[in-house]
Image (cartoon, rainbow, N blue to C red):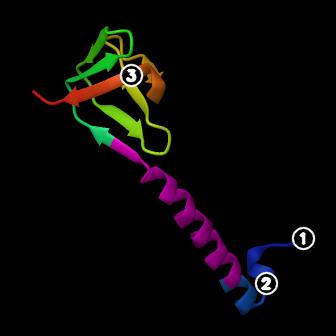
Amino acid sequence: MFTLSNCPEPMRFSFLFLFFLLGFVSCEKIIDVQRFDGPCTIELVDGSTITTEYSIEILESTGTITYRDSDRKLWSIKADEYVSYSCGN
């Protein structure tokens, strides 16, 4: 059976380095999200608005806004579905 403790020291270091490298690369994707504290108002393409008391998050790569409604249900709006957003008091 192969275990990390049975590996020679250089190989063990390589596995640990790979593990941390993969963890670091995956954390880079998290940085792609911007968070804005609520309350927030989102103006949709059709002229209607959505207001939430909670924070919104925007995925920079796609422009998708994620927000929670008054029941704390999670919703997403694609970039081509909204015109603008504003947050704060």
Q: In the image, which residues are magenta? A: 14-34
Name which residue lies at 42% across and 16% down: 73
Residue under numbered circle 2: 7
Single out the mark in the foreground, 1 or 3.
3
Give the mark nearest the N terminus, 1 or 3: 1
Above or below, 23 against 52 in this view is below
Q: Residues within 10 Å of mark 3 (few under 14, many from 20)?
A: many
Q: Which circle marks residue 35 in the picture?
A: none
Give the amino acid at mark 1: Met
77 inside magenta stretch: no
x, y percentage for residue 20? 57, 71
Instruction: Name the one closer to the observer, 34 or 22.
Output: 34
Q: Does the CB distance between marks 1 and 2 fall below 8 Å?
A: no
Instruction: Tell me the quarter of the image containing the N terminus.
Output: bottom right
Q: Residues within 10 Å of mark 1 (few under 14, many from 20)?
A: few
Q: CA distance from mark 1 to mark 2?
A: 11 Å
Give the amino acid at mark 3: Tyr
For residue 66, which quarter of the picture? top left
Q: Residues within 10 Å of mark 2 (few under 14, many from 20)?
A: few
Answer left or right for 40 relative to 16.
left
Residue under numbered circle 1: 1
Q: Does the CB distance between marks 2 and 3 fall below 8 Å?
A: no
Instruction: Name the one closer to the observer, 17 or 48.
Output: 48
Name which residue lies at 59% across and 71% down: 21
Give the mark nearest the N terminus, 2 or 3: 2
Instruction: Tell me the quarter of the image containing the C terminus.
Output: top left
Q: CA distance from mark 2 to mark 3?
A: 54 Å
x, y percentage for residue 87? 20, 30
Name which residue lies at 77% across and 90% down: 8
Q: Which circle marks residue 82 in the picture?
A: 3
